Amino acid sequence: MSADDDFRHESVQDRQSIVRYLQAITAGIEQGSITLGTDEHMLALAPDGMLELQVRAKRKGGRVKLGIKLYWRESDDESGHEALEIKAGK
């Protein structure tokens, strides 16, 4: 069962630091486990199944913005819902 939780972080980093963060996220997606956090708050994620990817880039007034978003549904094995079965015929 999933619990609501939120983690946010903003900072200014050099390119090499950003590359290391993105590589860690990529490795986490490949392994099915990503942990984000600081000393005060940690958030564990388990990307699995079909993931939705959104990429957006924008240039305006000398500033550039690149947004990357990933979405997926967490499986809820404790939900008690049974798998749907549909049969035709006798």
Image: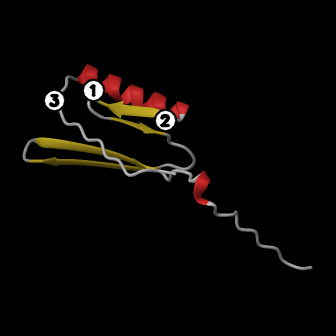
Residue located at (64% from left, 63% from top): 81
Q: 86 left or right of 80?
A: right
Q: Nearer the viewer, residue 36 or 80?
A: 80
Which of the marked residues, 3 or 2, is nearer the chain's N terminus?
3
- Distance from Cα at disc 2 to Cα at disc 1: 23 Å
Front in this rendered view, residue 84 or 41: 41
From the image, tell me which residue sits under label 2: 29
Residue 7 in the image: state x and y as whole percent.
29, 42
Please name the residue that numbered disc 1 is placed on: 39
Residue ID at (16%, 29%): 12
- Check disc 3 and report its element: helix, strand or loop: loop
User: What residue type is disc 2 on?
Assistant: Ile
Where residue 14 sits: x, y (%)?
20, 22
Q: Toward which corner of the image does residue 11 lie, by quadrant?
A: top left
Classify 10 Å Cα crowding around label 3: few (below 14), some (14-19), many (20 and above): few
CA gap, disc 3 and disc 1: 19 Å
Where is 5 relative to 86, above or below? above
Residue that lies at the very extreme toward the bottom in this rendered image = 89
Q: At which x and y percent is residue 71? A: 43, 51
Which quadrant does the C terminus fall into?
bottom right
Q: Residue 12 carries which label?
A: 3
